[in-house]
Amino acid sequence: MTRRYWNINLKEMIEAGVHFGHGIKKWNPKMAPYISAKRKASQGKSFLIVGTKKRAADLVASAAIRARCHYVNKKWFSGMLTNWSITKTRLSQFRDLRAEEKMEKFHHLPKRDVAILKRKLSTLQRYLGGIKYMTRLPDIVIVLDQQKEYIALRECAILGIPTISLADTNCDPDLANISIPANDDTMTSIRLILNKLVFAICEGRSLYIRNH
């Protein structure tokens, strides 16, 4: 039988500390029916991974790059999705600036202007670098911390974008379309879930390519 690398077994979850939640006072009883993660691969769909915890930033970027997904790992700007026309314009300007820099068009400008443009590029790369090639709204959004990324989840709900979210014991699994009960504080837990999702997405992409 073919091994599914995105399958999650109990031993892996315990070793990663996935089962360690918050204290009983923060327990949300709605978590009880949720016992496992569900594979969510796409058929030609685009994914956006959102995780702005400082410690998880590198994990988010690495996972997104491996799965060829867009990602936000520094800061979620309010309206990033709901004000898509503005975000789309900023991304277009960002791509134009990068192209101009690569073509060495900055060399003809005064040093002061070059310094300003490079600072602007650096800021754009830091906060929008993970979505610089996103030309339309994502089909699916993966959220690593429900409470920290609440604005992102709310924007997805407004726009009707399906979401997959890690849900610790102090979270409400109903806020996402698919909730994965897991500790969202430890890096081992986040890494395990991300790795499983990456395998699922990559497998889904392979199926899509073979069928088209």
Image (spheres, rainbow, N blue to C red):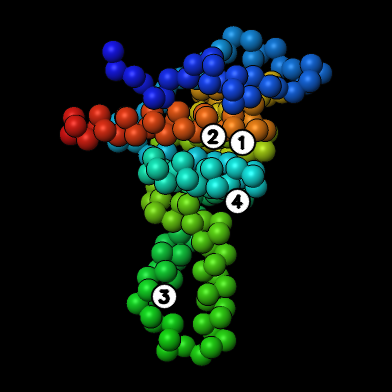
Q: Quadrant of the N terminus?
A: top left
Q: Residue at coordinates 56% horizontally, 26% vertically from top-left?
A: 176
Type of amino acid under label 1: Met
Q: Considering only order in the chain, which callout, 3 or 2, is on the residue closer to the N terminus?
A: 3
Q: Which residue is mark 2?
A: 191
* Nearer mark to the viewer, of 3 and 1: 1
CA gap between label 2 and label 1 equals 6 Å
- Asked whether the beta carbons under mark 3 and mark 1 sit within 8 Å of each other, the answer is no
Type of amino acid under label 2: Arg
Task: Please state the horizontal and vertical placement of residue 151, each as a whole percent of the image.
Answer: 63, 40
Name the one closer to the observer, 107 or 45.
Answer: 107
Residue 123 figure quarter: bottom right
Q: Which residue is mark 3?
A: 101
CA gap between label 4 and label 1 equals 16 Å
Residue 189 figure quarter: top right
CA gap between label 3 and label 1 equals 36 Å
CA gap between label 3 and label 4 equals 23 Å
Query: What SS does tag 2 mark?
Result: helix
Q: Residues within 10 Å of mark 3 (few under 14, many from 20)?
A: some
- Asked whether the beta carbons under mark 2 and mark 1 sit within 8 Å of each other, the answer is yes
Q: Considering only order in the chain, which callout, 2 or 4, is on the residue closer to the N terminus?
A: 4
Q: Which residue is mark 4?
A: 74
- Asked whether the beta carbons under mark 2 and mark 3 sit within 8 Å of each other, the answer is no
Q: Quadrant of the C terminus?
A: top left
Query: What SS does tag 3 mark?
Result: helix
Q: Considering only order in the chain, which callout, 1 or 3, is on the residue closer to the N terminus?
A: 3
Left or right placement of residue 82 versus residue 137 in this view: right
Q: Residues within 10 Å of mark 2 (few under 14, many from 20)?
A: some
